[in-house]
Image (spheres, rainbow, N blue to C red):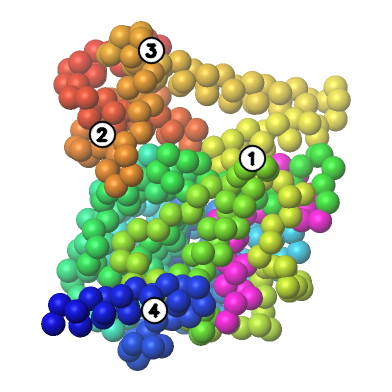
Amino acid sequence: MIFKYNVSVVFLVLLSIWVRTEGRSISQFLTEESEGTKWAVLVAGSNGWENYRHQADVCHAYQLLKDGGLKDENIIVFMYDDIANNTMNPRPGVIINNPHGHNVYKGVPKDYVGKDVNAHNFYNVILANKSGITGGSGKVVNSGPNDHIFIYYADHGGPGIVSMPSGEDVYANDLINVLKKKHASGTFDRLVFYLEACESGSMFDGLLPEGLDIYVTTASRPDENSWATYCGTYDACMVECPPPEFNGVCLGDLYSVAWMEDSDVQDRTSDSVAGQYDRVANRTAANLTHGFYGSHVMEYGDIVVSFDSLAAYMGVTNYSTNHSHAYVNDNAMSFSTSSKHVDQRNAELFYLFTKHQNAPEGSVEKVEAQATLKEALSKRSQVDNNVKNLGELLFGAGKGNDVLQSVRPAGQPLVDNWDCLKSYVKTFEEHCGKLTSYGKKHIRGIANICNAGIESDQMGAATAQACPN
């Protein structure tokens, strides 16, 4: 009996390896996929012209899902909607996600825009809690037990958080609790979640349990930035360069365009989510050693879900409408080293620096651009110094930096007490100013203050002293 059991286990392991290698769906061999409805939630969690790429990513995702057969009633889009008709946009009413790409903005549903793009609505949309929605179209994921759900979120992030343009940020423990509630409701069969953000792995590492029928991939490890790509620059550029009028703006994000450009050309019916994970991970990390850019794509949750076909979540491939390129070639998943890539944490500086470089010498525009750039650099220096001072006040000059920058081992969550983290972030912001997309990298340090057992009165006093202004 034990021998038969071991043989069965070995067979399934070998089959799983073969399936991943072949990029096929294990459900084609073991079971018939259920005929449920496909749902999608697409979130761009930023605003502002300099963050063009996040809404471009989400618009592209909508187009490939729509072309794949998903209905508008089952695709829910969150985006601030301040890019297409922005006064800075050289192509009014148009958004592109690739230097050779088509307009991906056309027809995108405006379910939740402006201030309605917030964590509260995001959670309630997933949970199909229509009464909890404020503003927007009111669309929710009203899924059933045989349905498949795909969630894609592109944004700035930090350890244990991803941003929202309005209201509170999305904290990892709150997101995990929402996903657990969705599973407990019995209103889906499988769920796949793709997350693009700096330190995005920290949203799930040590937090997402197995057994929820949820599979997640993230753009980066818990302690690693993700990268923007197709960035317009004043430098000489060849091949994959945005049109010159997009100088200073990145059209997409490296992990995001990798999975979408892959989805645009692969046969989603025969290819698996696992196959896509492998290709996207290879592309996103391809230039870490020699090109000094890229990140490590991670996976969490129930790996068995990744053996499903891509079509189970994204619909079938429509080869007549490719939104990545005006053409498709055999090297579609390679990535030209001549394309400009920018660490997401520094995308704002890239935009400001390029704007300064492009301004005519001696012009008012040049002076204003220089002042804005200097202010941004000064604010970065200030928050770095504030956090350094805080660490030294709490742990001493010799230990402060080491404690704040300590990274927990893989499989262990960022912080033990999430209420402590949320409270101490608020304490820091009350005394030192709101954390920007750059400053949010310091949330790890605040988490480590909680993990060290620092009491709230100590935190308050030290923060007030560290940030006297």
Q: In this view, does 64 lie to the left or right of 218?
A: right
Give the Cα separation between the discs numbered 2 and 3: 19 Å
Q: In this view, does 58 lie to the left or right of 423?
A: right
Give the Cα separation between the discs numbered 4 and 2: 43 Å
Residue at the (43%, 43%) spot, across then down: 199
Residue 166 placement (x, y as % from top left)? 40, 46
Count of marks overlaid on the render: 4
Give whichever of 93, 381 is nearer the camera.
Answer: 381
Residue at the (23%, 76%) spot, across then down: 6
Crowding near the residue tagged with mark 2, few <14, some 14–19, many ≥20 C-alpha atoms within 10 Å: many
Residue 339 placement (x, y as % from top left)? 74, 50
Q: Do the residues labelled 2 and 3 touch (CB within 8 Å)?
A: no
Q: Name the residue under label 2.
A: 421
Disc 4 vs disc 2: which is toward the camera? 4
Amino acid type, callout 2: Leu
Which mark, residue 15? Answer: 4
Crowding near the residue tagged with mark 3, few <14, some 14–19, many ≥20 C-alpha atoms within 10 Å: many
Q: Which portion, as a residue range, is magenta? A: 239-267
Q: Do the residues labelled 4 and 1 touch (CB within 8 Å)?
A: no
Disc 4 vs disc 1: which is toward the camera? 4
The disc, 3 or 4, on the residue closer to the chain's N-terminal end is: 4
Residue 318 placement (x, y as % from top left)? 61, 83
Disc 1 vs disc 3: which is toward the camera? 1
Label 2 secondary element? helix
The disc, 2 or 1, on the residue closer to the chain's N-terminal end is: 1
Residue at the (71%, 23%) spot, across then down: 370
Q: Name the residue under label 1.
A: 292
Is residue 321 a member of the stretch shown in magenta?
no
Give the Cα separation between the discs numbered 3 and 4: 54 Å
Residue at the (34%, 87%) spot, across then down: 30
Give the Cα separation between the discs numbered 2 and 1: 32 Å
